[in-house]
Image (spheres, rainbow, N blue to C red):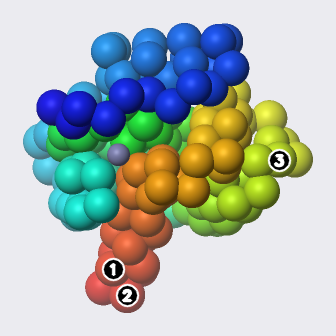
Amino acid sequence: MSTQATPPLDELYREVVLDHYRNPRHRGALAAPTGHFEGMNPVCGDEVTLDLRIENGRIEGIGTGGRGCSISQASASMLADWVEGRELSEVREAIGAVRHMLQTGEPPRTDMGDIEALAGVAQFPVRVKCALLSWNVLEQGLDEITRAA
Ligand code: ZN
């Protein structure tokens, strides 16, 4: 467990982040994933693993694992919650939207639910890497799966 505290986000956002951290969605490995992917953020010691099951151009199943700070693990939980059942093109757009949000602090143009609670992380550049870790793993996973197809 990382000793880094959750940054002083607005109270409401902080609660959303801590809820995902304490009750991660889609936690655990998938039985028959299309691919298993891992990433690390050595700056903070965060690790994220993603199992993806892709069928008919959609993410039909996702399982997460890993450990690290609240931001990294909450972000992975939010990601899993949001991407399951969505088309790959939509997921790719979401990766871009999250990256933009974390660089600028502006919420995404389309409603992304709990993910918007991470917008405040943009004020803490060191923690942006924590928030982006799972999204980078997802993107690399989609690239590998697409290349192999
Ligand atoms: Zn971290």
Secondary structure beneath label 3: loop
131, 108: nearer the viewer? 131
Give the residue drawn at x 64%, y 12%.
11
Q: Residue furthest right?
A: 109
Amino acid under label 2? Answer: Arg
Q: Quadrant of residue 148?
A: bottom left
In the rendered structure, the answer to whether residue 104 lies left or right of residue 132 reads right
What is the distance, in whole Å, between disc 3 and disc 2 at their CAs? 32 Å
Residue named by callout 1: 144
What is the distance, in whole Å, between disc 2 and disc 1 at their CAs? 5 Å
The residue carrying pointer 3 sits among few (fewer than 14), some (14 to 19) or many (20 or more) residues within 10 Å by Cα, namely some
Residue named by callout 2: 147
CB of mark 1 within 8 Å of CB of mark 3? no
Residue named by callout 3: 106
What is the distance, in whole Å, between disc 1 and disc 3 at their CAs? 30 Å
141, 137: nearer the viewer? 137
Residue 91, can we see it?
no
Residue 49 is labelled as: none
19, 58: nearer the viewer? 19
CB of mark 2 within 8 Å of CB of mark 1? yes
Q: Quadrant of the C terminus?
A: bottom left
Give the residue drawn at x 44%, y 17%.
18
Amino acid under label 1? Answer: Glu
Residue 113: give x, y in percent of width and height.
69, 27
In the rendered structure, the answer to whether residue 71 lies left or right of residue 32 reads right
The residue carrying pointer 1 sits among few (fewer than 14), some (14 to 19) or many (20 or more) residues within 10 Å by Cα, namely few
